[in-house]
Image: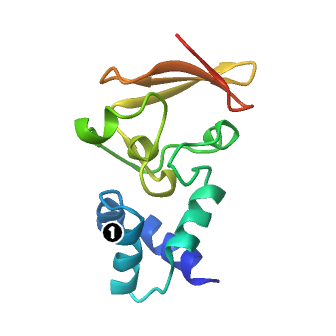
Amino acid sequence: MDQMQSFIEKAKSDISLLAKLNELDAEGIVALAAEHGFSITVGEYQLACESAGASKSGKLAEEELDSVAGGGATQNRWDPEICNKYTTVHYNCVGFLTQCWCDHYKRTWKGNSEHHHVCNMGRFDYVGFLDGSYRKV
């Protein structure tokens, strides 16, 4: 198993590590991985994000959202300085590799390949489609 996958498995099984990861940017995640004995690069982290359904900007691909159960943990990830910049789901809504959803983010399946995405803090309310398009509600 490669270093990135090993680090992901450790993070999934260590709630305190996962909480720390959810507070960091890519460079901070790489540094924390090194502290835990894992050698990963920012590029490897970004590739893992893409594989988990998040783009380099942190936005999620709609087709990946259906497979995400929200992880085992949630938390208040609301940060006005970060969240006020976005009008759709982004990294701060779902956390490290979509493992820790913000308590304010809700997603429901609407059928017909649609998900309803809502930020209870008022940042967004839209229906997203599997092709990546969306319409505001």
Q: Is residue 129 left or right of residue 37?
A: right
Examine the rendering and report whether any part of residue 76 can be seen: no
Identified at 36% across, 40% down, the residue is 102
Task: Tell me the quadrant of the picture where the N terminus can be found.
Answer: bottom right
Tell me what residue is drawn at x 29 percent, y 64 percent: 20
Q: Count the marks: how many?
A: 1
**Kind of residue at disc 1:** Leu
State the scheme by which the image is colored: rainbow
Residue 120, percent from left and from top: 34, 23
Residue 33: where, in percent of width, then height?
A: 40, 79
| Whether residue 3 is situated above or below residue 27 in the rendered picture | below
Q: Specify whether residue 24 is in view.
A: yes
On the image, the x and y values in percent for residue 9 come to 52, 72
The residue furthest top is 137
At x 55% / y 64%, what residue is drawn?
Answer: 46
- Which residue is identified by label 1? 17
* Residue with the most extreme front position: 85
**Left or right, residue 28 beside residue 71:** left
Tell me: residue 45, above or below residue 87.
below
Question: Can you give x and y, in whole percent of width and height, for residue 50 in the image?
Answer: 62, 56
**Element type at mark 1:** helix
Q: Is residue 24 above or below residue 77?
A: below
Graded by Cα atoms within 10 Å as few (under 14), some (14 to 19) or many (20 or more), the crowding at tag 1 reads some
Judge from the rendering whether residue 20 lies leftward or rightward of residue 105; answer left or right: left
Residue drawn 48% across and 86% down? Answer: 39
Which quadrant of the structure image shows residue 112?
Answer: top right
Is residue 31 or residue 15 the one in the foreground?
31
